[in-house]
Amino acid sequence: MRLALAQINTTVGDLDGNRERILEAIGEAKGAGADLVLLPELAVTGYPPEDLLLRPGFVRAASASLREIAAETHGIVALVGVPHLDTDLRNACAVCADGEVKAIYRKRLLPNYGVFDEDRYFTRARELVLLELGETLIGPTVCEDLWEPGPATDLALAGAQVIANISASPFHLCRDREREEIFATRARESSCIVAFCNAVGGQDELIFDGHSLVLDEEGNVLARAPGFEEALLVVDIEPAETARERPAPPEATVVPIGLPREQSDRIEPVVAPELAELEQMRVALELGLHDYVDKNGFGEIVVSISGGIDSALTAALAVEALGAERVHCVSMPSRFSSPETQRDARLLAESLGTDFRELPIDGVVSAAEAALAESFAGTEAGIAEENLQARVRGLLLMALSNKFGWLVVATGNKSELSVGYATLYGDLAGGFALLKDVFKTDVFRLARHLNERAGKELIPQTIIDRAPSAELRENQLDEDSLPPYSALDRVLEAYVEQDRTAEELSSDGFDPAVVERAVALIDRAEYKRRQAPPGVRLTPKAFGRDRRTPITNRWRG
Amino acid sequence: MRLALAQINTTVGDLDGNRERILEAIGEAKGAGADLVLLPELAVTGYPPEDLLLRPGFVRAASASLREIAAETHGIVALVGVPHLDTDLRNACAVCADGEVKAIYRKRLLPNYGVFDEDRYFTRARELVLLELGETLIGPTVCEDLWEPGPATDLALAGAQVIANISASPFHLCRDREREEIFATRARESSCIVAFCNAVGGQDELIFDGHSLVLDEEGNVLARAPGFEEALLVVDIEPAETARERPAPPEATVVPIGLPREQSDRIEPVVAPELAELEQMRVALELGLHDYVDKNGFGEIVVSISGGIDSALTAALAVEALGAERVHCVSMPSRFSSPETQRDARLLAESLGTDFRELPIDGVVSAAEAALAESFAGTEAGIAEENLQARVRGLLLMALSNKFGWLVVATGNKSELSVGYATLYGDLAGGFALLKDVFKTDVFRLARHLNERAGKELIPQTIIDRAPSAELRENQLDEDSLPPYSALDRVLEAYVEQDRTAEELSSDGFDPAVVERAVALIDRAEYKRRQAPPGVRLTPKAFGRDRRTPITNRWRG
């Protein structure tokens, strides 16, 4: 039997575009001689459609789109993810064959943690569906169904030989390895072949990384699709005869479908190599930016480059993602910008080959200070004057954006956003914050990685070597206001991503002074994060839909 | 038997402050001779604590706080809302008496729709608890448990005479009437007295409106606490003997507790009058602003007043909520501001008695235009130049905020935010957007209502009478860019709050041209709303946690 896993990139809400992409993939699979093709979870609507699912008109349109897909499905069986309304709304896998929807499998396990809200939309089901495809029994499942043992075990007891899983499983770093371990366990527990077809592409903050997989009954990888790009993974399988006892076969609907064709010669399946962590980070950031820009209909973007490393990395990634001709770089020096950073900004734009302009901000800052002079009389210069400069930059960037339709890509990193070392409407201004989930220490690692890959100073080495500074006052260094990033980032990771208390962190051996300072800053900065642009989620707990902290909150722990 | 319902205002995360407030309320109830006192849902932590519940240290601290409360509870029984960890995390009602926790009731129905995410945190339970207080059987429940028939019916079958419900039930307009209807039904179905103790106060976007209630077995109101303020509602009840058949008594743990004292003379319960819709809107907005400011530790606020009605209403509500001495008004005229609006801004500040200053923006705008001149050469003035003015105002406001610690209260309304007729980092800049859930037509109604209540032109009549204009170019009127608000608001309500499709709206009789234009604008503006400040939720579907729409979304329907 020949399987095809169509790892496609859909767009939320684009029912027409998604249908065309699905039909194209079904056609390709058929052309490759496949008997069965898997499409991702909710491929018809894109994932996650969020509250579009609460609009009856949207769900009706998705059902109509599925019927059109089924009507054109002949000579192959397609498993297509779609919302399905019966007594309740279901996250469903439609079995399409012979020009119609032969059966509907309804997701049994609904994730409602982390970035997931599936209990908000869907009702869980209990029953199984088994496709009898020629001699082979195949059990469809949807994403989370395969993360815990229940559904796979039930399918195995009912006689399934292949577990087909359609997914939209979001990425975090090295998530592909975690999945392979889980699926290998599932394959061994159930003595079934496991086929996992994942979505690929960016959707707001989420990345779907592909890495579709087929494992044999012992959990060995038979085929693996590449990460972060579309692919059609084709593999021939020979499911084992099921000779096991069935102590209490669960209730299952068996759907017999004739095998469409004779098997042709065996093909050699692809086993794509795994990517190292840093390379995953790079590719995920570029995919996330690319898809946000393209799916939202932007032609070009603009980045404020300061001569510092965050903006340099942002611009370099943007050029790789979109091409230099779609990236505009703007340097906005002030009286506190050093000649070195101004020079490095120019060098960077040259090295990247982007459009470049300089907009000095001192005139605007002075005019604003004049407007405020009476109000500020008798006060000492401080945060207000520093933020003013950042906000003038935000203002000029947004003016360029409004004038030319360029998307502003903000350059702040996760360390800054954690502790609030960023200016609302200033450096936080923009439609997308590319490095939002990248700690400062990883910004340095990534910059070096980009240069190594390029085999040249894509990002000038002086930018990488310079001590970080916001350059909002004379001789300012980040480390005047913050603990060193090497210490800070480790505390941030433990506090934000692992929910350790301040007390536990201190007894874990972190410097208590750093812990106390970081924890107080993190909790106070929630209001800034709430107004920050979306960015690419890379870690198991980004500042987005996976960390829902009240703004009004007196807990300090 | 004497009941007390302690409708208190807690703060999320403030375990120490909440414990003190709870003990104080228990003391007051005891002083009033009550046998049983109800506190709100999750009173120990404040509601909703969101992802604080995922931090093990927070849940441990809440349990410790509950034990301290129980240790001081003598001579009265207290029902206290607290997160409780057994095999899973529960949204629990702790029964405190004789210095200890006598029993834990665990919420059975967990809401996971609208603004609620309880499936993210809690596991639902099945069992009942019955307090045998002297001769009376009392069934504790938590909020949602009473919204559907199941738990009340089960308690009635198990012999309960009183259903005690501890709640944190969020407000929307006239939600108190809806609750009374539901609870009257519940009382009649179960032939039980129903006591509903609700939280009060603002928490980020949510308002808890109090309106605690006691209903007799026929659904008649015995007592009703006022809305939007703390109260201790005390009422004597005489539960009917339960003489009914019990066909299949569900499993229930019966917890006998001696009646602490003899009944004193009967007291006359309060039945607070209901507030009209417009007055509810006013009071909810003032409570929401007051609590956001105070609970987040702000002393004073600043409002940009333009001489238009949105900012006038915002300032007037702020003065009522906080007192004139805590409100700063700033007028920031440009070359496009008419002498009339400038005069009205001054008049308004005088009428309200607030601090007032004028910061003309033309100098800053000209400096910014000069900085952009080369980039903008050869282009026509348009949105970029208009938004620039709004952003200069945002910049100056934020400078005042940074310098003096004033919270910026943004002045945009729901109509503008729906269709994106607002400038990111301009008029949308701020820590709180008071009118975020108030349609423009209601802005006018509220302004007139405030003046009527005050018996004078608190808001100058010329402000109310003038046709709305953003004053960002010569002779600009909102209706040049948007449909008339009277038509637009009705479409917005049907599309946003009732999820009607564009097609359905047209066949509902709305002007198809208005529908098409509004729907396209709404869907495109999601990215702005994502970066907007929080504001007071007044309707069943505000732009906040109750409407979760993807930014990247090609669905237009």
Image: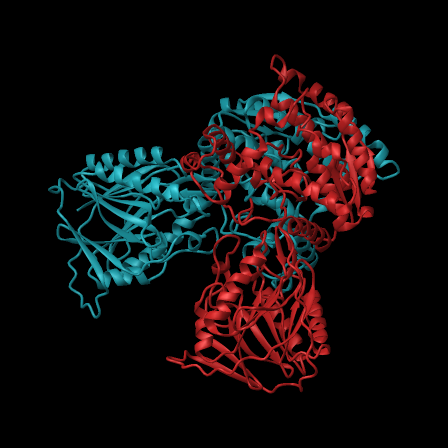
Chain colours: A cyan, B red
Farthest residue, direction right: A378
**Residue B197 placed where, x, y %?**
60, 67
Image mark count: 0
Residue B268 position within the rendered picture, expressed as x and y whole percent measured from the top left: 69, 73
Residue A438 lies, in percent from the top left, at 55, 43
| The C terminus of chain A lies in quadrant | bottom right
Q: Residue furthest left?
A: A262
Q: Nearer the viewer, residue B223 or A523?
A: B223
Residue A213 visible? The answer is: yes
Residue lying at 67% horizontally and 26% vertically, measured from the top left: B388
Looking at the image, can residue A470 be seen?
A: no
Left or right: A376 as drawn, with respect to B499 = right
Front-lying residue, B74 or A295: B74
Q: What residue do we see at 14% from left, 40% from top? A: A265
Across and down, in percent, residue A488 comes to 63, 51
Instruction: Quadrant for residue A364, please give it.
Output: top right
- Figure quadrant of residue A254: bottom left
Q: Is residue A13 left or right of residue A557?
A: left
Vertical position of residue A9 compared to residue B157: above or below = above
> Residue A258 vs residue B314: left or right?
left
Q: Nearer the viewer, residue B383 or A258?
A: B383
